[in-house]
Amino acid sequence: MVSSIQNQTLLKSAQNGLRILKLFTREKSIWGITELTRELELPKSTVSRLLNVLCKEGFIEKTGSKYRLGLSLLNLSGVIKYHMEIKREAAEPLQALVDKVGETAMIPTLEGEKVVYLLKIECKKPYPLHGDIGENNPATCSSSGKVLLAHLPMKKMEEILQAGIPKMGPNSVTDPDILMNQLQNIKKQGYCICIDEMHENSISISAPIRDYTDQVVTAVSLIGPKDRMSTKPISEMVDIVVKTAQDISYRLGYIEGE
Amino acid sequence: MNEWEWSIAMEINQKKSSSTLGNTLRLLNFFNMNEPEFTLSELAEKLGVGHSTIHRLTMTLMHEGFLARDLVTKKFRLGSSILAVEKTILSYYDICQISHPILEKLVQETGEAAHVSILKNHKVVYLQKIDSPNYTHLLSHEGKENPIHATNTGLVILAYQCQSEIEEVIAEGLSPYTSHTIKHPEQFKERLTKIRKDGYSYSKDELHLGFSSIAAPVKSPSGKVTYAVSIAGPSSRITPYRVQELSKAVMDAADELAIRNYGNKRAIKI
């Protein structure tokens, strides 16, 4: 997949610079140059040069003798969020879904063959198996990823399946033919249920969201531990997820039957 | 290769790789509210590089999650790695941990979008924004940078900075954004004096025509000002007639934020 093909195409200094940015997390939000050097396994002079460029462009700033992320990145994340009308429109119906079912709900999007989450509303008793904002998972073994894949043009769908299908949870499907069949069914029935595909003891249910162009732009995804979710009638949960997705679609200007 | 040639070669190599990262970062900065998507050739043209370079740059950015490419339209947009760092950045600013309920209340009271901002390198940056329930296409978002002299929040924070910083901003030039932007240094200084006297600033059409805002400083117990609270909305709603009522709500929110942020001591009125 991407990583294996392009390792030679990737630009080392750009990649190292971006890797530096990704090291700054809420858990470790400030880094010294020696720590960075150790973590990246690069010469100190290289790290120092990369930091200079990052500082110059406002992506990193000095705080005492150490470094932290700069506001350039906040500007860019603001640009992403501003354009996520979907996120604005989805927040309220998604919260209602979480309140009703008592499980975590998310809004996913595809980045290549991965599914990432734009919005996540946790339930009162979150279970530590769900993807976090900005984290990515293989699309082929999550219900949200499958819903999004199912609505891609056939050629794209085939390309992604041909690129290789990773094995995640015990039930994750790795045969491209079976998966293709599933995707076609998902497109027809308008929802997807995955049991133990991403992780053991997990159920996720997803349904597509369309906007005014009639295209599937994202999905609603409900996720929880199997032992808790299987005590509730699954058909009822499917209905609620589908209804939530419809509700958000209408807010985005989708008109049924057009 | 002798030592001298070697050192020159190393230097060229280093320069090249610094400019690679520089180009990468500049490419990211092309994306803004008005232009959230680009094609490969648009990016190549904007950056002034050839096809193979832009191909490798975008590949690298996608590999690390900083860019994403729409599978159907083939256009590039910013990727989720950028979204992931937002919480890290906001964690540096303690005020963001407490400002949310205060801004929420202000939005409820006024019906307009509310922000907390700081100054950074002579620009105003919105750290937090809460949208108005009355949907308006406001040209602000978290992290958005605006010029100090044309924004209310910028003026409010600048009014409480030292004289030399004020002079620096004036020296950088008071370029007009609309016909209402203050252009003359003397007028500019008078405006800052008025802000210090009133404790808030009202502006109409200074940055964007048709939009007004009201801002107030968040004062530390020693009178230092790092942040400002503001509301913004269409000039048809934030009318001169309502300024008194709205400015009180904004000042109350700023004072409450000061108390919560700097402890119980009430901010000294200067």
Image: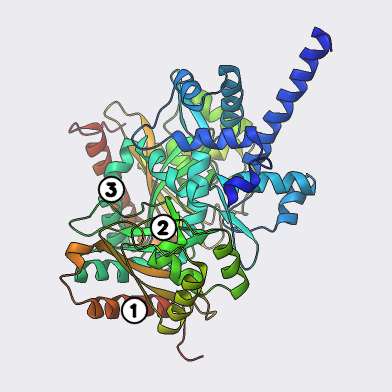
- Position in image of residue A46 (x %, y %): 60, 22
Which amino acid type is marked by label 1? Answer: Val
- Name, please, the residue furthest toward the top: B3
State if disc 3 and disc 1 touch (CB < 8 Å): no
Residue at x-position 19% and y-position 77%: A233
**Could you tell whether B194 is left or right of B261 in the image?**
right
- Name, please, the residue furthest toward the bottom: A257
Identify the chain of the residue marked 2, using the numbered disc in the image.
Answer: A
| Disc nearer the start of the sequence (1/2) | 2
- Residue A159 vs A167, above or below: the answer is below
- Position in image of residue B21 (x %, y %): 65, 35
**Could you tell whether A132 is left or right of A114 in the image?**
left
Nearer to us in this view, B41 or B113: B41
Kindly tell me whether residue B194 is visible in this rendering. no
- Position in image of residue B30 (x %, y %): 64, 49
Residue at x-position 26% and y-position 51%: A128
Which element carries disc 1, helix, strand or loop?
Answer: helix
- Residue B9 vs A223, above or below: the answer is above
What label does residue A117 carry, if any?
2
Quarter holding the N terminus of chain B is top right
Q: Which residue is mark 1?
A: A242
Q: Which residue is mark 3?
A: B253
**Could you tell whether A177 is left or right of A25 in the image?**
right
Which amino acid type is marked by label 2? Answer: Tyr
Which element carries disc 3, helix, strand or loop?
Answer: helix
